[in-house]
Structures are given as C-alpha cells and as structure tokens.
Amino acid sequence: MLKQAASRFLLATMCSLPLMADVVHLKDQGSVTGKILADRPDYIVVDLGFTALTIPRSHVDRIEEAAPKKAASTNASAADRGTKTLDLYSVAETPPGEQTVLEWAREVGEAVVQVRTPGGLGSGFILNEDGALITNFHVIEGETQISVEVYHNAGPRQLERKSYKKVRILALNRFQDLALLKIDDEGARKFKRVLIGSSDALNPGQRVFAIGSPLGLERTVTEGIISTKSRDIEGNLYLQTTAQINPGNSGGPLFNLRGEVVGVTNMKLTFGEGLGFAIPSEMVKFFLDHREAYAYDNDNPNNPYRYLPPPELIPGKPKANDSKGS
C-alpha cells in the first residue's frame, strides 16, 4: 500500500524534483526520491515537490543521501535550518514549523543547562556553539565560582553529563535580572544552541513550555499557555504563564511550539499555582545587542558599575560662588 502511494506521488512530481535528491529505500524493494525534511526515530518526512510524504521508520530499509553531511551536522537540528546568526545568538529567518512538546524537548533539551554556584543552582540555555549562555542575575549574584552542567547527546536517547568549571561572566543587568556567561574550558566540544524568537509575536492562550532544573531535578519539562504577555511588576513587563515555574527554573528558557526561546523564566508567586513569570525575549535581545553597556567588572562582582556619592562640602569652607562685596 505504501509502495503504491509512493509511486503515485513520484509519477505526479518527478518533473519538479531537484537534481540532487535523497533516496529512501523501502523494505518491500521500493524507493522514494525527494528531499528529507525531518528524520525522527519513528518516522521520516520526504518532500516530493508539492506535497510531503510521511514514512514510518519500520518501512525504511536504508537512506541514500544526495551528498554526505558535513561533520558539523551532528550538532544541527531542524531548528537550525533557515537561521540567521546575529553576533552571539541566532534567530529564524523563516519561522520553523510547529511541533509537539515531546519532539521539541528531544531536539532543544541538549542546549538547556544547569548553572551551579556555592550558594545554590539555577538553569540557563546556550546561545552559540562556543558556549555563551544566558541565565538570571540572581542565580549568580555575588558569586565568582560558577560551574555549568551540560547534557550532551551521546546517541539515540542517550545523554552524557558533563560539568564545566571554567565559566566567565561577560555581562550583568541586575535590573532586568539577566546574566551572560561563557564556558571557557579547554577542549570543550561544540555546543548545541537555541534560537531566540519574538515575544512580541505571542498571544494570550498560546501554548509554551519550559525546561529547567526545579529543586535540582534537571531536564524537567513543564507545559502551559501564555496568560498575558504584559504583566507589570515593579515597572518591568513580564510574560505570565501557566507553565509550572519553581526554584531552580530560574534562568531557564520558555519556548514556543516552534522551538524558539520567547522568555527567560525567573519567578513565580509563592502562594498560588500556575502563576509563573518570564523575561520577554525582546529584553534578552536588547541586553545581548548592547552588552558592552553591561560589561562585567572583576573588581566589582556585585554590579558592573559602582556609583559613588557626590562629594560633600567641607564644614566651614565657603562655597565657590560665595563672595563678599567690597
């Protein structure tokens, strides 16, 4: 049945197929030719021109790719296609297609990290393959000994836990509760990274999900909706979400169903459930685009700048503009 369906599709689309195409060889001796759009553990999706065909993995004998993948492709995913890199972070030029939370959790979970300090722990997410990452300011406030735990993909459904001890602070914004860190361990592998999306494009009722380490339970996934995208708290606007946020989630990503980070989870109401808050991704992009203004100063770890009080007038000394008439 699958072979007959594939043959009908091929007959209708053979003129529109690209010259360089993938070939999926089926177990019943048939084959399907086209561009592979998605390669999942349970199925693959092949572009046949004007339509796409989903083939169960159980029917696939082998896949003959049009050209060998580059070595760096082991760090790529569906979220990497059609992206634009802007200095430290990447955005999607064409919005990725929506997937289920299950599919996205498998795909972007490797880029979500646990941030540890002597005083506690939080979450974070990788911005680029060189190890730049975002977390909350309050997660590392007053700390200089920071480590980051990453769960690298070691094969199908297998993860390798790796702790990086050489972590540098690049920029801090205590007022918007953001911190930019960098993993500097020698010999560190290339990191999986996330895409930064637009919080402005969100709408109340839209589904989102968070990944983090609530109470130290790493790689915990919670799902919910956007309750409102403009909750005013002490002069700043936050995303309000029903996705469960708990201590340890701080600094972790809030994703839309396109796999893009639309917020940084940072707080919840103590007395209440389903009342979590996240820093909008537009604030994150502003922080990253202007990070030189928030550059970290090693001599003053609590704040990038130190504001001194104005000098006081010495008692008994006349003011500069004081003069006695003759």
Image (spheres, rainbow, N blue to C red):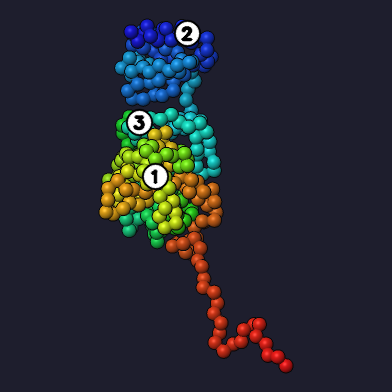
Looking at the picture, how far across and down is residue 179, in whole percent? 44, 53
Residue most extreme to the bottom: 326
Measure the alpha-carbon separation of dots 2 and 3.
31 Å
Which residue is at a point 36% across and 17% down the rendered structure image? 55
State whether residue 135 appears in this view. Answer: no
Q: Name the residue type under label 1.
A: Thr
66 displayed left or right of 204 = right
Q: Earlier in the sequence, mark 1 or mark 2?
A: 2
State whether residue 27 appears in this view. Answer: yes
Residue labelled with disc 2: 12
Category of crowding for the residue at label 2, using alpha-carbon neighbours closer than 10 angstroms: few (below 14), some (14–19), many (at least 20): few
Residue labelled with disc 1: 228
Q: Name the residue type under label 2.
A: Ala
Looking at the picture, how far across and down is residue 260, in whole percent? 43, 37
Which residue is at a point 48% across and 22% down the rendered structure image? 68
Residues tagged 1 and 3 counted as in contact (Cβ below 8 A): no
Residue labelled with disc 3: 100
**Nearer-the-camera pick, 70 or 32:** 32
